[in-house]
Amino acid sequence: MIANSKIRFSDLSRQKSFMTDLSKDLTTRHNVDQAIGYYLERAGIPDNELPWAAFSRGVRLDKQVLLADLPEQDDEWTVLPTVSAGRSR
């Protein structure tokens, strides 16, 4: 369980990195999709109306999973838009 922990978010190039603890604006009751939105807002990254995904340890995280239900090892995320052949999925 990732509860009472920190999450480090970054974009693919690692130029926009952000770390938060799960106690204030983002809590263990939020899901992965809400956490992605939180990161985009805090890092000043426009979503450009594209779907975004988070990956940890090379595996795409399920957007509906609560942060409390993630393994402790999933505390570093790479967040990127999901696009295919020039258009969004």
Image (cartoon, rainbow, N blue to C red):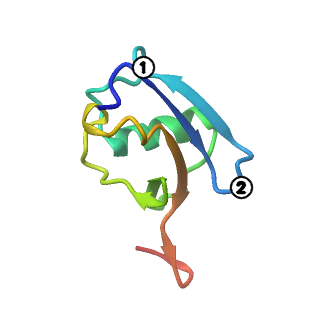
Q: Where is residue 45 drawn, in percent x and y?
A: 62, 45
Q: Residue furthest bottom?
A: 85
Q: Where is residue 67 drawn, in percent x and y?
A: 31, 35
What is the quadrant of residue 69 in the picture?
Answer: top left
What is the quadrant of residue 27 in the picture?
Answer: top left
Q: Amino acid at mark 1?
A: Asp
Q: Secondary structure at mark 2?
A: loop
Relative to residue 19, is residue 25 drawn left or right? left
Q: Earlier in the sequence, mark 2 or mark 1?
A: 2
Q: Residue at x 36, y 39 (%)?
A: 34
Q: Nearer the viewer, residue 66 or 56?
A: 56
Q: Residue furthest right?
A: 15
Q: For label 1, count other residues whose C-alpha is less than 10 Å away and answer few (under 14), some (14-19) or many (20+).
A: few
Q: Tell me if residue 23 comes above or below residue 88 in the rendering.
A: above
Relative to residue 70, is residue 81 drawn left or right? right
Q: Amino acid at mark 2?
A: Ser
Residue indicated by mark 2: 13
Q: Residue at x 71, y 55 (%)?
A: 13
CA–CA distance between discs 2 and 1? 25 Å
Q: Tell me if residue 83 comes above or below residue 62 in the rendering.
A: below
Residue indicated by mark 1: 25
Relative to residue 32, is residue 38 drawn left or right? right
Q: Residue at x 47, y 55 (%)?
A: 55
Q: Secondary structure at mark 1?
A: loop
Q: Residue at x 44, y 57 (%)?
A: 53
Relative to residue 6, is residue 18 drawn left or right? right
Q: For label 2, count other residues whose C-alpha is less than 10 Å away and answer few (under 14), some (14-19) or many (20+).
A: few
Q: Quadrant of the C terminus?
A: bottom left
Q: Tell me if residue 23 comes above or below residue 9 in the rendering.
A: above
Q: Quadrant of the N terminus?
A: top left
